[in-house]
């Protein structure tokens, strides 16, 4: 049999499969209508497992593939039934009542950041909120506490760097507090090696900075056999170097921090990757969803069954939604269970996106919607971009 003939057979089979799939989805619709009328739950895990076990057993050498295929079909069938019964009323109400903007005067807002003047977080906050008052706190947890208590209206925090990866501690705090993300900014980061005005590059033996800053400049540190000294913040490192007055110590910080604390710039742009940027998010206790929101963040746990992550991701794919990040973090108080944090492009005002969120909120443990917001890049954010 030639290739063309084989392809004709495949086309014929595909036509039959498509018609059968449409018939099956029609049946799933009828099941959804029955469950709506009789107030039955959508998910029947026992029945699904029975079907999947049977399919795998009867699938012969393709049993594992048949199980995956049917698992996806069931996932899509459940999504259809969730739409019919109107699942997720609680989260639907939350999302539909979220305000599009904060109407308070910018001058009256307090913005919490970790660190001191001259830190990258300080620059991100003033880029996002140029007319507001920036409040500095010793730790990321203190930023969350300030927002939680109402001492600050918003917090600005780094969540990932293009070369050093995620800031895990901030993600853990996001998962702990379950605040909303109301905006984001990709801020280009240019690191400077800064020291006392009397120091020269050849004098430097120790380099101080935040662990992320040290990681982003690890090639230079290793090449020059420098001792890395972690600090709570890049600007804090600059302040320490200025106060310690040691000729052999330098800080990895911003040029603004060097000016703030009277240091000399010994070297510029020496990070591992020249296209270096850090993503900052704006956190709030209140949900704001700007009209031009283009990114959604959420988290959830997964049920203990084979292929559960694949099946959930299949739901996003079926709606044409692009995942931009997935991060797993240990679930506090449990053994070997994880929370998954997801970012994807979309606007909650699209009906299919709203329906997906409502369906997932019904099925997935620990589900939390973090926000739908506008993300700006290249340091180009303006107050209007975030409508604060």
Image (tube, helix red, strand yellow):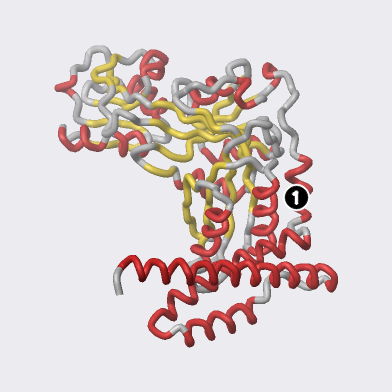
Rendered residue at 48%/40% (across/down): 159
Residue 210: give x, y in percent of width and height: 37, 35
Q: Please identify the quarter of the rendering in which residue 26 is found.
A: bottom right
Q: Nearer the viewer, residue 318 or 355?
A: 318
Q: Residue at x 26, y 23 (%)?
A: 246
Q: Is residue 24 above or below residue 211?
A: below
**Residue depicted at x 68% and y 36%:** 289
Q: Is residue 270 left or right of residue 6?
A: left
318 left or right of 289 in image: left
Total marks in image = 1
Q: Tell me the quarter of the picture where residue 349 sits.
A: top right
Quarter of the figure with residue 43: bottom right
Quadrant where the N terminus is found in the figure: bottom left
In what quadrant of the picture does the C terminus appear? top right
Q: Give above or below for 96 relative to 3.
A: above
As drawn, 134 above or below 31:
above
Q: Where is residue 236 shown, x and y percent of the image?
A: 41, 27
- Left or right, residue 240 beside residue 25: left
Query: Residue 182 at what x, y percent from top left?
Result: 63, 35
Q: Nearer the viewer, residue 33 or 365?
A: 33
Residue at coordinates 49% horizontally, 76% vertically from top-left?
A: 67
Q: Nearer the viewer, residue 147 or 96?
A: 96
What kind of element bears circle 1?
A: helix
Q: Which residue is mark 1?
A: 92
x and y, in percent, of residue 311 in the image:
53, 64
Q: Nearer the viewer, residue 250 or 176?
A: 176
Mark 1 crowd level (few <14, some 14–19, many ≥20, 10 Å Cα): some
């Amino acid at each position: 049999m030639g290739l063309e003939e084989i392809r004709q057979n495949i086309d014929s089979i595909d036509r039959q499969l498509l018609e059968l799939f449409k018939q099956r989805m029609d049946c799933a619709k009828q099941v959804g209508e029955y469950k709506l009328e009789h107030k039955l739950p959508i998910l029947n895990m026992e029945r699904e497992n029975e079907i999947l076990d049977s399919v795998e057993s009867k699938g012969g050498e393709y049993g594992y593939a048949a199980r995956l295929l049917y698992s996806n079909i069931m996932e899509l069938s459940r999504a259809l039934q969730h739409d019919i019964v109107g699942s997720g009323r609680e989260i639907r109400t939350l999302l539909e009542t979220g305000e599009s903007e904060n109407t308070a005067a910018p001058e009256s807002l307090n913005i919490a950041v970790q660190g001191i003047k001259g830190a990258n977080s300080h620059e991100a906050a003033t880029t996002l909120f140029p007319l507001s008052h920036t409040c500095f706190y010793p730790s990321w947890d203190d930023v969350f506490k300030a927002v939680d208590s109402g001492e600050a209206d918003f917090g600005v925090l780094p969540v990932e760097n293009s070369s050093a990866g995620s800031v895990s501690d901030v993600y853990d705090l996001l998962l702990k507090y379950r605040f909303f993300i109301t905006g984001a900014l990709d801020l280009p980061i240019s690191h400077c090696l800064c020291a006392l005005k009397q120091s020269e590059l050849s004098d430097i033996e120790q380099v101080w900075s935040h662990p992320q800053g040290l990681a982003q400049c690890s090639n230079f540190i290793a090449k020059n056999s420098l001792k890395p000294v972690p600090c709570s913040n890049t600007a804090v490192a600059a302040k320490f170097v200025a106060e310690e007055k040691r000729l052999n110590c330098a800080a990895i910080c911003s040029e603004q921090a060097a000016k703030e604390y009277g240091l000399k710039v010994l070297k510029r742009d020496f990070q591992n990757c020249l296209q270096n940027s850090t993503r900052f998010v704006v956190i709030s206790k209140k949900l704001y969803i700007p009209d031009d929101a283009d990114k959604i963040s959420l988290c959830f746990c997964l049920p203990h069954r084979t292929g559960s992550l694949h099946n959930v991701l299949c739901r996003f794919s079926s709606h044409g939604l692009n995942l931009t990040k997935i991060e797993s973090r240990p679930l506090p108080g449990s053994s070997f269970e994880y929370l998954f944090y997801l970012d994807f492009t979309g606007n909650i005002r699209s009906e299919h996106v709203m329906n997906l969120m409502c369906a997932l909120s019904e099925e997935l443990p620990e589900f939390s919607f973090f926000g739908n917001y506008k993300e700006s890049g290249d340091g180009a954010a303006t107050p209007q971009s975030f409508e604060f």
